[in-house]
Amino acid sequence: MNIKRLIYLIPLLALQACMDPKVKVDTYEAIPKQNWTYINPIKATINVTDSTQAYNIYVNFRHTADYKYSNIWLRFHIIGPQQKDIPVRQEFQLAMNDGQWLGTGSGQLFTYQLIYKENYKFASTGKYTLIVEQNMRDNPLKAISDVGIYVEEASVN
Protein backbone atom coordinates (compact mmCIF):
# COMPACT_ATOMS: atom_id res chain seq x y z
CA MET A 1 0.00 0.00 0.00
CA ASN A 2 1.20 3.50 -0.83
CA ILE A 3 2.44 5.36 2.30
CA LYS A 4 0.61 8.58 1.30
CA ARG A 5 -2.66 6.70 0.99
CA LEU A 6 -2.06 5.12 4.40
CA ILE A 7 -1.45 8.54 6.00
CA TYR A 8 -4.87 9.72 4.75
CA LEU A 9 -6.62 6.46 5.60
CA ILE A 10 -5.58 6.20 9.27
CA PRO A 11 -7.45 9.35 10.47
CA LEU A 12 -10.56 8.29 8.55
CA LEU A 13 -10.51 4.84 10.14
CA ALA A 14 -9.97 6.35 13.59
CA LEU A 15 -12.88 8.74 13.09
CA GLN A 16 -15.13 5.96 11.85
CA ALA A 17 -14.23 3.79 14.85
CA CYS A 18 -15.35 6.58 17.21
CA MET A 19 -18.76 6.96 15.59
CA ASP A 20 -21.69 5.34 17.40
CA PRO A 21 -23.44 2.88 15.05
CA LYS A 22 -26.78 3.68 16.74
CA VAL A 23 -26.56 7.31 15.59
CA LYS A 24 -28.16 7.57 12.14
CA VAL A 25 -28.20 11.37 11.69
CA ASP A 26 -26.23 14.09 13.49
CA THR A 27 -26.25 17.49 11.80
CA TYR A 28 -25.69 21.12 12.69
CA GLU A 29 -26.19 23.92 10.18
CA ALA A 30 -24.94 27.42 10.85
CA ILE A 31 -27.76 29.95 10.59
CA PRO A 32 -26.70 32.82 8.28
CA LYS A 33 -26.08 36.01 10.29
CA GLN A 34 -27.75 34.22 13.25
CA ASN A 35 -31.15 35.15 11.77
CA TRP A 36 -33.33 32.06 11.25
CA THR A 37 -36.03 32.81 8.68
CA TYR A 38 -39.15 30.89 7.75
CA ILE A 39 -37.67 30.15 4.34
CA ASN A 40 -34.57 28.47 5.82
CA PRO A 41 -35.78 25.08 7.15
CA ILE A 42 -33.29 22.51 8.40
CA LYS A 43 -33.44 19.16 6.59
CA ALA A 44 -31.91 15.73 7.05
CA THR A 45 -32.44 12.38 5.36
CA ILE A 46 -32.53 8.95 6.96
CA ASN A 47 -32.69 5.62 5.17
CA VAL A 48 -34.89 3.29 7.23
CA THR A 49 -34.08 -0.35 6.56
CA ASP A 50 -36.11 -1.86 9.42
CA SER A 51 -39.58 -0.46 10.13
CA THR A 52 -39.75 -2.33 13.45
CA GLN A 53 -36.77 -0.36 14.84
CA ALA A 54 -37.70 2.53 17.14
CA TYR A 55 -35.80 5.84 16.95
CA ASN A 56 -35.35 8.92 19.11
CA ILE A 57 -35.49 12.16 17.12
CA TYR A 58 -33.93 15.35 18.52
CA VAL A 59 -33.27 18.91 17.40
CA ASN A 60 -29.70 20.11 17.89
CA PHE A 61 -30.08 23.79 18.80
CA ARG A 62 -27.73 26.65 19.69
CA HIS A 63 -28.52 30.27 20.49
CA THR A 64 -26.57 33.22 21.82
CA ALA A 65 -27.15 35.01 25.13
CA ASP A 66 -28.96 37.71 23.10
CA TYR A 67 -31.93 35.39 22.39
CA LYS A 68 -34.91 37.28 23.82
CA TYR A 69 -37.33 34.44 24.56
CA SER A 70 -37.45 31.66 27.15
CA ASN A 71 -38.93 29.20 24.64
CA ILE A 72 -39.07 28.33 20.97
CA TRP A 73 -41.86 27.00 18.78
CA LEU A 74 -40.76 24.63 16.02
CA ARG A 75 -42.64 22.98 13.19
CA PHE A 76 -41.73 19.44 12.16
CA HIS A 77 -42.31 17.44 8.99
CA ILE A 78 -41.54 13.76 8.43
CA ILE A 79 -41.86 13.00 4.71
CA GLY A 80 -41.40 9.51 3.35
CA PRO A 81 -42.90 6.61 1.43
CA GLN A 82 -46.49 5.83 2.40
CA GLN A 83 -46.54 8.78 4.82
CA LYS A 84 -48.54 11.96 4.32
CA ASP A 85 -46.82 15.15 5.49
CA ILE A 86 -48.71 16.37 8.54
CA PRO A 87 -46.80 19.30 10.09
CA VAL A 88 -46.59 19.23 13.88
CA ARG A 89 -45.99 22.38 15.94
CA GLN A 90 -44.22 21.94 19.28
CA GLU A 91 -42.94 24.26 21.99
CA PHE A 92 -39.62 23.79 23.79
CA GLN A 93 -38.67 25.54 27.02
CA LEU A 94 -35.16 27.06 26.87
CA ALA A 95 -35.00 28.94 30.19
CA MET A 96 -36.33 28.73 33.72
CA ASN A 97 -38.76 31.34 35.09
CA ASP A 98 -35.84 33.32 36.53
CA GLY A 99 -34.25 33.59 33.07
CA GLN A 100 -31.47 31.04 33.62
CA TRP A 101 -30.82 29.11 30.39
CA LEU A 102 -31.44 25.36 30.52
CA GLY A 103 -28.87 24.57 27.83
CA THR A 104 -25.21 23.97 28.39
CA GLY A 105 -23.30 27.22 28.10
CA SER A 106 -19.96 28.11 26.67
CA GLY A 107 -19.42 31.84 26.93
CA GLN A 108 -22.25 33.49 25.05
CA LEU A 109 -23.45 30.30 23.31
CA PHE A 110 -26.02 27.85 24.71
CA THR A 111 -26.54 24.34 23.34
CA TYR A 112 -29.56 22.03 23.61
CA GLN A 113 -30.62 18.65 22.37
CA LEU A 114 -34.41 18.94 22.31
CA ILE A 115 -36.35 15.67 22.14
CA TYR A 116 -39.05 15.67 19.47
CA LYS A 117 -40.02 11.98 19.32
CA GLU A 118 -39.09 9.08 21.60
CA ASN A 119 -39.35 5.48 20.43
CA TYR A 120 -40.72 6.60 17.07
CA LYS A 121 -41.27 3.94 14.40
CA PHE A 122 -41.33 4.97 10.76
CA ALA A 123 -44.33 3.63 8.83
CA SER A 124 -42.27 1.60 6.35
CA THR A 125 -38.76 1.15 5.04
CA GLY A 126 -37.30 3.72 2.67
CA LYS A 127 -35.88 7.23 2.61
CA TYR A 128 -37.39 9.84 4.90
CA THR A 129 -36.78 13.57 4.99
CA LEU A 130 -36.99 15.26 8.37
CA ILE A 131 -37.62 19.01 8.31
CA VAL A 132 -37.49 21.52 11.18
CA GLU A 133 -38.71 25.11 10.80
CA GLN A 134 -38.77 27.95 13.30
CA ASN A 135 -42.39 28.86 14.02
CA MET A 136 -42.13 31.98 16.17
CA ARG A 137 -43.80 35.31 15.36
CA ASP A 138 -40.44 36.95 14.66
CA ASN A 139 -39.12 36.51 11.15
CA PRO A 140 -36.20 36.40 11.17
CA LEU A 141 -35.71 34.91 14.61
CA LYS A 142 -32.53 36.55 15.90
CA ALA A 143 -29.62 35.13 17.94
CA ILE A 144 -29.95 31.55 16.59
CA SER A 145 -26.49 30.21 15.90
CA ASP A 146 -26.96 26.62 14.67
CA VAL A 147 -29.77 24.12 14.20
CA GLY A 148 -29.61 20.46 13.28
CA ILE A 149 -31.23 17.08 13.53
CA TYR A 150 -30.09 14.08 15.56
CA VAL A 151 -31.59 10.59 15.15
CA GLU A 152 -30.51 7.54 17.10
CA GLU A 153 -31.81 4.00 17.42
CA ALA A 154 -33.83 3.74 20.62
CA SER A 155 -32.63 1.24 23.20
CA VAL A 156 -34.72 -1.88 23.59
CA ASN A 157 -35.96 -2.28 27.17
Image (spheres, grey):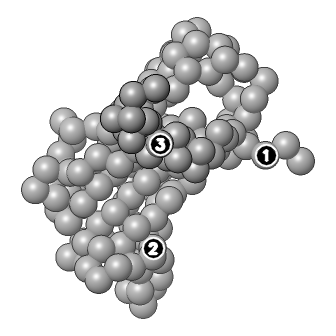
- Residue 122 in the figure: left or right of residue 65: right
Q: Which mark is residue 10?
A: 3
Q: Residues within 10 Å of mark 3 (few under 14, many from 20)?
A: few
Sequence-wise, the earlier of marks 3 and 2 is: 3
Question: In percent of the image, x 50 and y 46: which residue is there?
Answer: 15
Question: In percent of the image, x 23 and y 51: which residue is there?
Answer: 30
Tell me, yes or no, whether the two marked residues, 3 and 1, touch with CB atoms within 8 Å: no
Sequence-wise, the earlier of marks 3 and 1 is: 3
- Residue 125 in the figure: left or right of residue 76: right
For the residues labelled 3 and 2, the Cα–Cα distance comes to: 35 Å
Question: In percent of the image, x 29 and y 83: which residue is there?
Answer: 107
Residue 143 in the image: state x and y as whole percent: 20, 66
Q: Quarter-wise, where is residue 117 in the image?
A: top right
Q: Quarter-wise, where is residue 108 in the image?
A: bottom left
Q: Which residue is mark 1?
A: 155
Q: Is residue 149 visible?
A: no
Residue 109 in the image: state x and y as whole percent: 30, 74
Q: Residues within 10 Å of mark 1 (few under 14, many from 20)?
A: few
Amino acid on which the number 1 mark rests in the picture:
Ser
Q: Which mark is residue 103?
A: 2
Circle 1: element type: loop
Amino acid on which the number 2 mark rests in the picture:
Gly
Circle 3: element type: helix
Q: Residues within 10 Å of mark 2 (few under 14, many from 20)?
A: some
63 or 15: nearer the eye?
15
Circle 2: element type: loop
Label 2 or label 1, whichever lies nearer to me, is: 1
